[in-house]
Amino acid sequence: MTPFRYRRRIQEFNEAFTRQVASDLQRRRDEIISPRNAQKFSHGRMWKTKPTDHGDDAGEMQAQSFELLSRFDDVVNHDLAKFVEARNHLVDGLMAQFQASLYQTISKSTEKSGNTVVVGPGQSPAEAFLAALEMIEFGIDENGEVSLPQFHMGREGIEKTIADLEAQGPEFTERVEQVKAEKSELARQRESERLAKFPPPWEGDSL
């Protein structure tokens, strides 16, 4: 038996609260992963993908949960600001789990392929940045433009890396631009070879 009188309003509130949380989570996820690279499943927990040399061909959904506490006094006092705080707290907690799961998955994949860079003694963050850039393959987006890689770090790491990059001389900057140009050209060549495998478009396709 619910202690509240308006049961219908309870359901409406829960549905509205859930929609707001889902919307906030979607917006936060879009900041990390492009919506174009996201897929949704209507049922099931497992999926199959094309096997690769360093990746698995099967995956499984990972459950995420977060505990949220609503204090009785806040409800009795009609402190509506607490609902907003609770929603933000819930989104932050779920996003932290999502990010941890995402980076753990990427870490496992790169460890399998050996495509990793370790900052050794005496090596600067700028040197590690350049080494990572030399190992990465650039892609081509849906508009045919070169898609540059993204670098994800913690706040302290990114501040240290940016400061070290800005302290480098013109030779280092020239080397970075050279690597970007070479990688971009290789990406265009791969895309051209991929497109060449398909028959030319029929004239009627553009109508």
Image: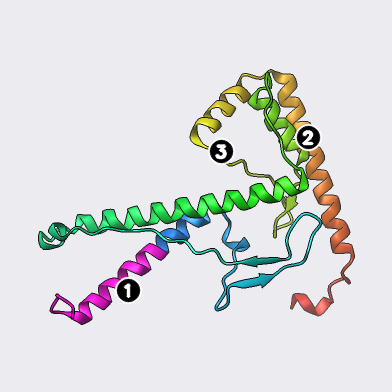
- Judged from the image, the secondary structure of the residue bearing numbered disc 1 is helix
> Is residue 190 rendered to the left or right of residue 143?
right
Choose top left, top right, bottom left or bottom right for residue 8: bottom left
Q: Residue at x 19, y 58 (%)?
A: 71
Residue closest to the eye, 159 or 188: 159
Q: Visible in this render: residue 31?
A: no
Q: For marks 2 and 3, give the CA distance.
A: 21 Å
Please provide the residue range marked out in magenta: 1-22
Look at the image and say whether residue 13 sits in the magenta stretch.
yes
- Badge 2 is on which residue? 179
Q: Quadrant of the C terminus?
A: bottom right
Q: Position of residue 190 (x, y in %)?
A: 85, 53
Q: Residue at x 55, y 32 (%)?
A: 158
Q: Type of residue at label 3?
A: Met
Q: Visible in this render: residue 36?
A: yes
Q: Type of residue at label 1?
A: Glu
Density class for disc 3 (Cα within 10 Å; few <14, some 14-19, many ≥20) is: few
Q: Residue at x 77, y 36 (%)?
A: 134
Q: Position of residue 43 (x, y in %)?
A: 55, 78
- Judged from the image, the secondary structure of the residue bearing numbered disc 3 is loop
Q: Position of residue 168 (x, y in %)?
A: 66, 19
Lower position in the chain sequence, tag 2 or tag 3:
3
- Judged from the image, the secondary structure of the residue bearing numbered disc 2 is helix
Label of residue 15 in the image:
1
Density class for disc 1 (Cα within 10 Å; few <14, some 14-19, many ≥20) is: few
Choose top left, top right, bottom left or bottom right for residue 119: top right
Density class for disc 2 (Cα within 10 Å; few <14, some 14-19, many ≥20) is: some
Q: Position of residue 161 (x, y in %)?
A: 59, 28
Work out whether 178 lies above or below 31. above
